Amino acid sequence: MVLFRAAGVLLDGEGRLPAILFHGVPLTLLPSVNPDFGIFQLTTGLVLRVNLGLLPGLLAGWAVYRRFFAPGRKKKTKNAGRPDPVRMIRRRAPAMTGTSEERTDHGPGLILASASPRRAELMRSIGLGFIIRPSRVPEIAVPGEPPEDFVLRVSRSKARTAGRWNDGHWVIAADTVVVKDGEILGKPADREDAARMLRLLSGATHRVVTGITVVPPGGELLADVAETAVTFLRLSETEIERYVASGEPDDKAGAYGIQGLAAVFVEHIEGSYSNVVGLPLSLLYQLLLETGYPEDAFDWS
């Protein structure tokens, strides 16, 4: 029965009238007085007389032909269905080591414990080469925890996680939040949450707070906080809806990116612009030098 089922034999609900699909055309078994022969009638009316003793072998042969040799069948190889090992390595490499542009060939090495493309671009802008090693840690504020303490705690945790295998590299980690009326605004949970945050920021001044941690190889970590005051224009509901629909707020603290479309909402700032983007460069520069990073390792040529 297993052989017949694999070859395409069909039965009705009560197991009667076996039929075979031949190129999509059912052949129905008709009664025969000779037990050694069966008569198969096509729906077109053509009658075939077949030796039933040879039928299992014929069906098995046909199944093998359709499985392995029929036109259009792709020959299976040893690694069929598996990703190319070389391509796997190439796909994984950027997540593990960064691109060649991000790797340094001057001075001591750096590890950026962040997947943020904005932080990576800021690092490159001051002549630093680095390896990207994202450090994913819970970013949940403890009830009553001051924003400054929260971003310092998260940045330290990121640095420690990424620095477990620093191999003689400096480790840089940061965490940025927007603060309005004492509420910490991280990345929005969804687009409704993004619209809610933008309504809070509309026509008012808020704070952008970033905690940054630098860990030198074999040394003690050094951490500090940068703060910038940002004042928004008053936003209409239409402006909020259009901005949220653009998708830009989705992965940004406070639901906006000052370096993007939201630049038109910013009336003025007091403090570091790069801090609002996500990495206060002046503070980073000072921390690196304080932990012994060579000043001439910044490639300003």
Image (cartoon, helix red, strand yellow):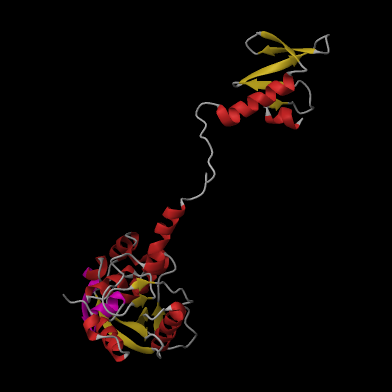
Name the side, left or right, on which 270 lies relative to 137.
left
Q: Is residue 240 above or below residue 291?
A: above
| Residue at image coords 28%, 81% | 280
Over which residues does the magenta segment extend? 264-278
Which is more toward the observer, 289 or 184? 289
Q: Position of residue 71 (x, y in %)?
A: 51, 26
Q: Is residue 211 above or below residue 55?
A: below
Name the side, left or right, on which 151 lies relative to 72.
left
Q: Is residue 294 above or below residue 131?
A: below
Q: Position of residue 238 (x, y in %)?
A: 29, 62
Which is more toward the observer, 35 or 225? 35
Q: Position of residue 104 (x, y in %)?
A: 29, 73
Which is more toward the observer, 117 or 217? 217
Q: Quadrant of the C terminus?
A: bottom left
Q: Position of residue 65 (x, y in %)?
A: 60, 26
Name the side, left or right, on which 170 lies relative to 49.
left
| Residue at image coords 26%, 81% | 281
Which is more toward the observer, 245 or 52? 52
Q: Quadrant of the N terminus?
A: top right
The answer to which quarter of the image holds residue 178 is bottom left
Q: Is residue 153 above or below residue 300?
A: below
Q: Is residue 287 magenta?
A: no
